[in-house]
Amino acid sequence: PDVSVWAADAAAPGRPNAGVVVDDDGITLVDALTTPAQASELARALEPTGRPIRRVVLTSSHAEYCGGTSTFALAAVYGTAQISAHLDLPPNPDGLSRLYPDLAAELGELTTRPVSHVIAEPAWISPTAVAVPVSGELAQNLVVQVPEAGVVFAGALCSFGVTPLCFEGDLQAWHAALDRVLELGSVIVAGHGSVGGEAEVRTLQRYLEACVDAAGDPGRLGEGPWTDWAAPAYHAVNVERAALLARSEDRVPDTMLALLGLT
């Protein structure tokens, strides 16, 4: 009863989910949504609990997971060293507005809070929640396990019904990390889309395999459930990133730069 999902109103980019874990000492949030406006709606919904928001755990440094951190001014912010380094840099509102045009008005003045607590190994961050470092969407992501509930808040590591976006991660490491996610719990809360379990995670793994097997050609991605996923423009980014890594080129794909308006 003290473990909840703040579910987006649509399975789409810029419309992420967040996790809520209520302990006696206060609330732990998993991810802070894309904008302060989204985060403020979540904060208002939690006011009836009468408990403060003590902790915000970021599963990624990308805007859909940290854009609303300024709303939670008194909470400790947990992240990996890489997430911390990224949040020490200013946001790119022009690029974000291209990715999420329906949120452009909210992204123009976006600011984010820095990480206050760096997680380098699995650690209890509250009486019921464990933050676990994993690799995939970034070199250093986090997921949050609630062992007693059998729940994993996978955040950026899972996207069910929405195409994931891997422009600076490693798709093969991501594939392996999903096995670790399944070891941590049976109920998987995705950063985007529906709550799922092993079937949805295995489908995501098959998609990552398909991106690698495409060898740089999105036309070779093949048929699968991902054909109907939201954000199909991300397929080309993922396929290009996999091909770059196969050539030992660790850089942002040109297709991603184009989405951001940088080419």
Image (cartoon, helix red, strand yellow):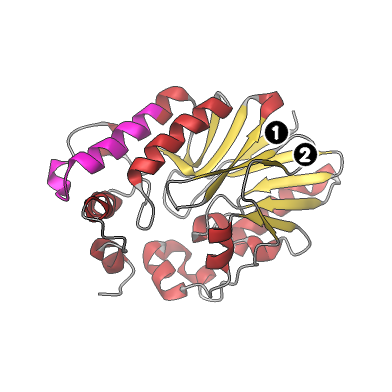
Q: In the drawing, does residue 203 fall left or right of residue 59?
A: left
Q: Is residue 139 above or below residue 130?
A: below
Q: Is residue 205 above or below residue 251?
A: above
Residue plotted at (24% across, 62% down): 255
Residue 216 inside the magenta-drawn segment: yes
Q: Which mark is residue 22?
A: 2
Left or right of 9 in this view: 45:
right
Question: Could you tell which of marks 2 and 1 lies nearer the N-terminus?
Answer: 1
In the image, which residues are magenta? 202-220
Task: Give the numbered dot on residue 3.
Answer: 1
Seen in the picture, residue 151 relative to 18 is either above or below; the reply is above
Marking on residue 75: none
Total numbered labels? 2
Dot 2 and dot 1 residues touching (CB under 8 Å): yes
- What residue is rendered at 36% in x and 34% in y? 204
- Residue 242, position as x, y percentages in the image: 26, 49
Q: Report x, y in % for residue 120.
A: 61, 50
Q: Using the rendered view, name the quadrant where residue 117 is placed.
A: bottom right
Q: Nearer the viewer, residue 9 or 112?
A: 112
Name the chief secondary structure element in magenta: helix
Q: Quadrant of the C terminus?
A: bottom left
The answer to whether residue 189 is left or right of residue 211 is right
